């Protein structure tokens, strides 16, 4: 049986935000290296990706640094409500963030990667990986690949990380569960009427190291509420909370029955400065390296890892040194490293606090502090934003998805 053999200087495993951002940053820094880069994606875009879908100002800043402007549907959020045990406080700033569908966001990024000439192979899961002289060999159903550098952008359960880097910190996994609830009477819900996202920290007193969320979103042109429960598990010695039971109670309090919807769950690897970040010929980015456990918002950090990984790769080829011994320093001293460090430290302190009085008191204070820190008044309307009044016109015209294939390098409508 003839086995196809491919070679590249760089192979990126995964085309989510971290993998795509690494490819885009490489294309900006060293187009000649980007032309010898292959991105391997196990699925085909647009593929299902569980996520709250919040695009923060930080994520927009990184996208701007990458020279990317994604024109995809999104629901702009003007109000963020923090609540715990009946006490609430709010941040009210127009275009504070926006909620997108991750399958559309990731597909648009992948389309941008292709549009800039980087080779993206979809529908090719990596089935085996091993070290060889001067690099790494990977196997997919299409054949074998050799590369001098492999970027692990394959998520929380990264195969590359497990096989080539380290299993240290394997237990640093957050848990998230969610449902999507269609909302035909969207105008009656604060999420849609007031463009509001809700973070409810009441479950912390039940042992959840995180929050319940209600995010307004759009799915196939229809108003849909993204409802979920995030448990960071950053205090690893604490007992595991019964997430399904607590989530069912939270939904019931909002007039929804868990049994009526498809429950979905997924892990996130959380950041710790002691996590492994590299090995000879291998770099970790995104959830393979770790994202922040305070809010579990992984998109921003995943994108920003790409802006750290790309210069490290270029430097490795310039020096002919693929040890990546300096990558940890690069991560920890970067913008993304600063964000991850303070948020992980804050999470380890905050989620040890379980008394309702502490959370009621803290909730009154948090919105004021965040409003001062954010300072985002009069943010421009993000591309693709759809507000409630537009649903009536658009609900029968769902957005067209990205279509791509391994053989083609073109993107469909977004």
Image: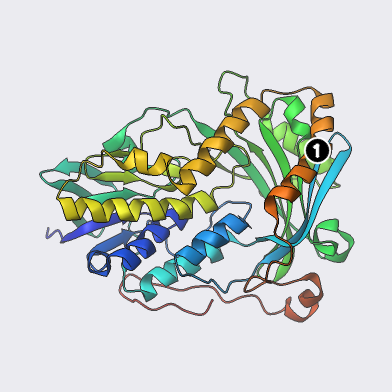
- Residue 35 relative to residue 361: left or right: left
Name the residue located 68 percent from the left edge and 52 percent from the top edge: 374
Which of the 4 quarters of the picture holds residue 398?
bottom right
Name the residue located 38 percent from the left edge and 76 percent from the top edge: 115
Name the residue located 19 percent from the left edge and 47 percent from the top edge: 136
| Residue labelled with disc 1 | 365
Q: Would you call the spot at circle 1 few (<14 residues within 10 Å), some (14-19), or many (20 or more)?
A: some
> Where is residue 62 drawn, in percent x and y?
50, 59
Task: Note whether 371 is above or below 206 in the view shown.
Answer: below
Front residue of 360/125: it is 360
Front residue of 83/177: it is 83
> Where is residue 365 drawn, in percent x and y?
80, 38
Tag 1's secondary structure?
helix
Which of the 4 quarters of the picture holds residue 93?
bottom right
Tell me, yes or no, if residue 291 can be seen here.
no
> Where is residue 268 drawn, in percent x and y?
52, 40
- Residue 96 relative to residue 87: left or right: left
């Amino acid at each position: 049986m003839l086995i196809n053999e491919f070679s590249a200087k760089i192979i990126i495993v995964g085309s989510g935000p971290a993998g795509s951002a690494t490819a885009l940053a490489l294309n900006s820094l060293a187009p000649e290296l980007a032309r010898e880069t292959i991105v391997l994606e196990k699925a085909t875009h647009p593929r299902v990706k569980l996520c709250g879908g919040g695009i923060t100002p930080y994520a927009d800043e990184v996208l701007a640094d990458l020279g990317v402007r994604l024109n995809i549907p999104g629901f702009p959020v003007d109000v963020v409500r923090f609540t715990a045990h009946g006490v609430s406080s709010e941040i009210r700033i127009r275009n504070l963030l926006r909620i997108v569908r991750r399958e559309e966001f990731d597909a648009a990024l992948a389309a941008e990667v292709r549009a800039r000439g980087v080779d993206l192979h979809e529908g090719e899961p990596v089935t085996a990986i091993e070290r060889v002289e001067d690099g790494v060999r990977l196997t997919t159903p299409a054949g074998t690949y050799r590369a001098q550098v492999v970027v692990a952008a394959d998520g929380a359960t990264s195969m590359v990380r497990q096989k080539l880097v380290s299993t240290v910190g394997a237990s640093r996994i957050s848990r998230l569960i969610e449902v999507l609830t269609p909302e035909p009477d969207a105008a009656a819900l604060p999420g849609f009427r007031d463009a509001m996202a809700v973070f409810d920290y009441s479950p912390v007193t039940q042992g959840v190291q995180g929050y319940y969320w209600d995010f307004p979103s759009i799915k196939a042109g229809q108003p849909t509420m993204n409802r979920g429960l995030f448990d960071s598990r950053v205090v690893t010695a604490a007992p595991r909370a019964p997430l399904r039971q607590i989530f069912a109670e939270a939904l019931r309090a909002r007039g929804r029955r868990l049994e009526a919807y498809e429950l979905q769950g997924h892990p996130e690897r959380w950041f710790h400065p002691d996590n492994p970040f590299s090995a000879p010929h291998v770099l970790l980015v995104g959830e393979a390296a770790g994202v922040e456990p305070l809010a579990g918002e992984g998109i921003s950090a995943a994108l920003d890892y790409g802006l750290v990984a790309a210069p490290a790769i270029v430097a490795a080829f310039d020096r002919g040194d693929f040890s990546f011994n300096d990558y940890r320093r690069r991560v920890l001293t970067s913008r993304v490293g600063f964000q991850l460090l303070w948020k992980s430290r804050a999470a380890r302190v905050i989620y040890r606090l379980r008394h309702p009085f502490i959370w009621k008191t803290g909730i009154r204070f948090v919105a004021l502090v965040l409003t001062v820190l954010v300072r985002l008044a009069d943010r421009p309307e993000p591309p693709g934003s759809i507000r409630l009044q537009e649903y009536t016109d658009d609900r029968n015209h769902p957005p067209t998805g990205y279509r791509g294939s391994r053989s083609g390098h073109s993107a469909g409508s977004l």
